[in-house]
Amino acid sequence: MKSQHHRIQTLCCGTLVLLVLLGLTAPVQSQEQAPFRIARLRYGGGGDWYSNPSSLPNLMRFLEQETGLKTAAEEKVVSLTDPDLWDYPYVYLTGHGSIRFTQSEANRLREYLQRGGFLHADDNFGLDEFFRPEIRKVFPDAELVELPFDHEIYRMYYKFPEGLPKIHEHHGGPPHGYGIFLDGRLVLFYSFNTDLGDGWEDPEVHNDPEDKRRQALQMGVNIILYALTH
């Protein structure tokens, strides 16, 4: 278990991230180190797992500009049954509607997270009622718990003393950041009632103010860097 966790983190160039976090000069990417690439989760059930198509390329570009970590130009689409799932330490899930995991997919996701992977689920309006029962299938005995505002994910690189930024109004009220912990490690982060992915999209898609888009991108960087270093 421990060796698999180390392997996944090595693939994401965690050492380079740590150099940046320590305030050192932007690291030089060696030819042997593959650029960091976000994996987008393709799931069954009919929901639009492919929504916000410009979001992840924009987030990876922002991550490279802000931290110096070399990133890929495009995301990678993966299914839970793909043999190369293990090559991606950070998997992103979003959508507006129905999501369904088969039991074998739920088991594979649990194994991926137990072995060092990280899932960021980002609520696009309409996802919540489907996501919660499916994640219960993955972890029948683990609860989604709300993270306190002083959790490290909110101060990993940028400071968010009041937790998640509010990007879009959906359910009303403040946004919430939930997590699932395994043996003390945060393996799943669920950003609810904020819609970070909309904020990562090209400016003309939602016409969000620039400060909102930047907050969304900054929070995205925090989540990625947390995932790559824990």
Image: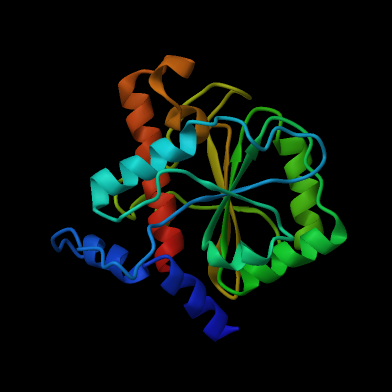
Residue 44 in sight here: yes
Viewer-closest of 21 and 161: 21
The x, y position of residue 196, in whole percent, is: 49, 34
Q: In which quarter of the image is the C terminus?
A: bottom left
Quarter of image, res 204: top left
Give the side of residue 46 with respect to residue 164, left or right: right
Reply above or below: 3 against 118: below
Asked if residue 105 lies left or right of residue 36, the reply is right
Please tell me whether residue 54 is drawn above or below residue 190 in the rendered image: above
Q: Tell me the residue at 49%/77% (across/down).
A: 7
| Horizontal arrangement in the rendering, residue 216 relative to residue 64 (left or right) | right
230 left or right of 68 in image: right
Residue 99 placement (x, y as % from top left): 77, 41
Q: Foreground: 1 or 170?
A: 1
Residue at 23% in and 67% down:
19
Q: Nearer the viewer, residue 125 or 150?
A: 125
Q: Which residue is drawn at 70% across and 32% down?
A: 48
Residue pictured at 45% horizontal, 28% vertical: 201
| Front residue of 93 and 193 | 93
- For the N terminus, the image quarter is bottom right
Residue 182 appears at what percent x and percent y?
62, 70
Total tally of numbered discs in the picture: 0
x and y, in percent, of residue 109 in the image: 70, 62
Q: Which residue lies furthest to the left in this view?
A: 25
Residue that protrudes farthest toward the right in the picture: 103
Task: For residue 158, say whether it is visible.
Answer: no
Q: Which residue lies furthest to the front in this view?
A: 31
